[in-house]
Image: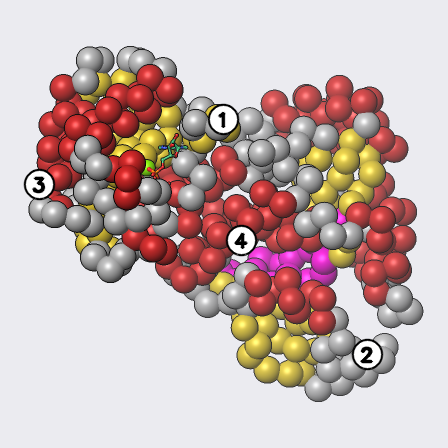
Amino acid sequence: MHTAYLSLGSNLGDRQKNLETALSQIAECEGVKILKCSAWLENPAIEEAGPNPFLNGVIKISVKSSPIELLKELQRIELNIDSNRAERGRKSARIIDIDILLFDRLKLDSAELTIPHPRMLNRNFVLKPLDEIEPKIVQETVYSFFKLKPEYKIRRMMLSDLDQVCIIEADAYGEVHWTRDNFVSELDNTVGDYNVLYKDGTVAERASSRLRRTNDHSVLNVHEDHEDDENAEIEVRQRCQNENEILGYLGSWMIIDEMHITTIATAKNHTRKGVAEALLIAQIFKALEQNIKALTLEVRVSNVKAQGLYEKYLFKRQGIRKRYYEDTLESALIMWTEDINSDEFQKNFRERLVELVNKSELFDK
Ligand code: ADP
Ligand code: MG
């Protein structure tokens, strides 16, 4: 038996009746049981499907058949309710649309069927009712999209990484950059959280399978502290270090309910792959897990590239600290996000995440 979530929508005719007819026909399919049903909510039509607004909802079903067989059944029901469906064409207004959002934890990408539904994370009219019937599943689905290829991992920065980190730092920031001593003291900073994104070789791959067992719950491959395993991990990590090529790093401080991003850099031969962005996303996941309310940072006014990345994630300019950097007396731009749980931040976060995963070679599709 499988569990699936379906979205239903209608913006032509008697919308409520269309949805309810679809529901009863779904309930009649062999091996299908409707377990939960959200409220029907009205939403403006997207793209060329207007002008009539849609009525949308999401249902949870148990189903015996395969995803493809389920899709065929749903298409049969769509045609039953709207025999002219094909003539109106995709994206147009429709009497009924039934999509498969999720099917167990399956990931499928074929010509006929993509699961999870590729556009679901961009559509609040799907996410809101889904969240209503199954809290947490939206978050889980967002996490499931963020899947680095097995050779790429994110973990805490260690002293043994600093040779590589200092080279990346010097390349990224030129004359004025953090010294090895700065990093050494930051790794000791109790509010500090410094992470590297690295690519590991075969030796490291074998060793790190032990690491992964300790954080099975973490979809990010982000290392979590477990005292029991700590010694074993330290030993494993030390053995790994020569095999780990560091692509970039991000540092932050957590101060009560704020996260301060303190540094971010990408190795010069790995730019334009989304390394910094992947690290930022992983850190935002952490912030959300740890009930952080807002993220903030200071960035050199000349560091336009970093500002662009932060703006993409809705950091807003809040002020200037004049002559902030002791080395060059350059000013710092202060940037803040709004509440990271707000609808606006979350929607943008999901959209940027899906965009990055689709275009960056670091991710499993
Ligand atoms: P929309 O993208 O607005 O749902 P249609 O329902 O007209 O547009 O298009 C359905 C097409 O999308 C079908 O040909 C179907 O094979 C394909 N498809 C791919 N993934 C899914 C999915 N998860 N659920 C439903 N249809 C899907
Ligand atoms: Mg459809």
Tag 1 or tag 3, which sits nearer the N-term?
3
Q: Is 133 rendered above or below residue 104?
A: below
Placement of the N terminus among the 4 image quadrants: top left
The residue wearing badge 1 is: 110
Badge number at residue 326: 2
Q: Is residue 205 left or right of residue 310?
A: right
Task: Identify which residue is drawn at 48% across, 28% down.
Answer: 111
Q: Are marks 1 and 2 in contact (CB under 8 Å)?
A: no
The residue wearing badge 4 is: 352
Badge number at residue 253: none
What's the amino acid at mark 3? Lys
What's the amino acid at mark 1? Ser
Residue 154 x, y percent position in the rendering: 68, 40
Q: Are marks 2 and 3 in contact (CB under 8 Å)?
A: no
What is the count of numbered marks? Answer: 4
Distance from Cα at disc 2 to Cα at disc 3: 68 Å
Magenta segment, prevailing SS (helix, strand or loop): strand
What's the amino acid at mark 2? Glu
Q: Secondary structure at mark 2?
A: loop
Please say whether residue 250 is one of the residues in the magenta stretch: yes
Task: Identify which residue is drawn at 24% across, 24% down.
Answer: 76
Q: Give the quadrant of residue 102.
A: top left
- The answer to whether residue 296 shows anywhere in this view is no
Task: Identify which residue is drawn at 52% across, 38% down.
Answer: 145
Is disc 2 surrounded by few (<14), some (14 to 19) or many (20+) residues within 10 Å? Answer: few
